[in-house]
Image (spheres, grey):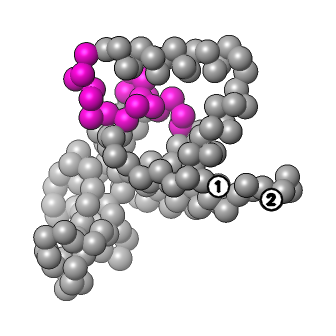
C-alpha cells in the first residue's frame, strides 16, 4: 500500500472528494439534509474497491483492543436485530457510520448531486446518456438544483 513515507493514492482521493463535498455543502447547506444521524444514502451494494477494503481493515486493526471489541460488538448487534435494516450498510450503528474515518470513496460523495451514466437514456441539459442522481432528501425544490456543471 505505502512505503511508509507516502500516503496511498486512494487516501488523497478521499481527501479531494471530501474537500469538494465540504465546499459544495457550504454553498448549498440550506438545500441539503446531510448530517450526523442521516443514513439515507448508506445502503448495501455500494462499491468498495479492494484497496479501500484494505484501508478499512488496516484502520480496524489500528484501533485499541477495547475499540475493536466495541466495534465488533456493534456489528454483531446489527446482524442479530430484525431485518428492517436489511438494506442498510453493515457498518451503520444507530444510523451512524462506524468506519467513518476509513469509509470508501463513494461514501465521501453521498448527498451530492452526481452526474451518472443513464440507464434509461434520459437526457439532462443536452448531455446525452447522463442523468442526475442525488439523495431524495436534498434539493426538494427542483428550481434550486445546482447547474449540471456543479454536479
Nearer to the camera, 39 or 144: 39
Mark earlier in primary sequence (1, 2): 2
The total number of labels drawn is 2
Label 2 element class: loop
Residue 125 on image: x %, y %: 20, 80
Circles 1 and 2 in contact, beta carbons < 8 Å: no
Residue found at x 73% / y 21%: 64
Structural crowding at the residue carrying mark 2, measured as other residues with C-alpha within 10 Å and reported as few (<14), some (14–19) or many (≥20): few
On screen, residue 71 above or below 87:
above
Q: Mark 2 — residue?
A: 6
Quarter that holds the N terminus? bottom right
Q: Quadrant of residue 122?
A: bottom left
Q: Is residue 13 left or right of residue 134?
A: right
Residue found at x 31% / y 33%: 88
In this picture, which residue range is highlighted in magenta?
Answer: 82-100
On screen, residue 139 above or below 124:
above
Q: Is residue 96 left or right of residue 70?
A: left
Residue 87 on image: x %, y %: 27, 34
Residue found at x 14% / y 76%: 121
Give the Cα distance between marks 1 and 2.
10 Å
Residue 104 on image: x %, y %: 51, 48
Is residue 121 on the magenta stretch?
A: no
Q: Mark 1 — residue?
A: 11
Residue 90 on image: x %, y %: 40, 31
On screen, residue 81 above or below 109:
above
Q: Is residue 72 left or right of residue 62?
A: left
Amino acid at each position: 500500500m505505502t512505503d511508509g513515507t507516502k500516503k496511498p493514492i486512494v487516501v488523497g482521493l478521499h481527501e479531494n472528494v471530501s474537500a469538494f463535498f465540504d465546499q459544495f455543502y457550504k454553498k448549498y447547506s440550506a438545500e441539503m439534509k446531510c448530517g450526523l444521524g442521516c443514513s439515507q444514502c448508506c445502503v448495501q451494494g455500494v462499491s468498495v474497491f479492494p484497496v479501500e477494503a484494505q484501508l478499512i481493515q488496516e484502520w480496524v486493526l489500528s484501533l485499541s483492543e477495547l475499540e475493536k471489541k466495541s466495534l465488533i460488538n456493534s456489528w454483531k448487534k446489527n446482524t442479530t436485530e430484525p431485518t428492517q435494516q436489511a438494506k442498510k450498510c453493515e457498518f451503520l450503528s444507530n444510523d451512524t457510520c462506524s468506519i467513518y474515518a476509513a469509509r470508501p470513496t463513494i461514501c465521501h460523495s453521498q448527498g451530492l448531486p452526481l452526474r451518472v451514466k443513464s440507464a434509461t437514456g434520459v437526457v439532462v441539459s443536452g448531455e446525452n446518456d447522463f442523468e442526475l442522481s442525488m439523495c431524495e432528501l436534498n434539493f426538494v425544490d427542483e428550481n434550486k438544483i445546482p447547474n449540471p456543471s456543479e454536479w
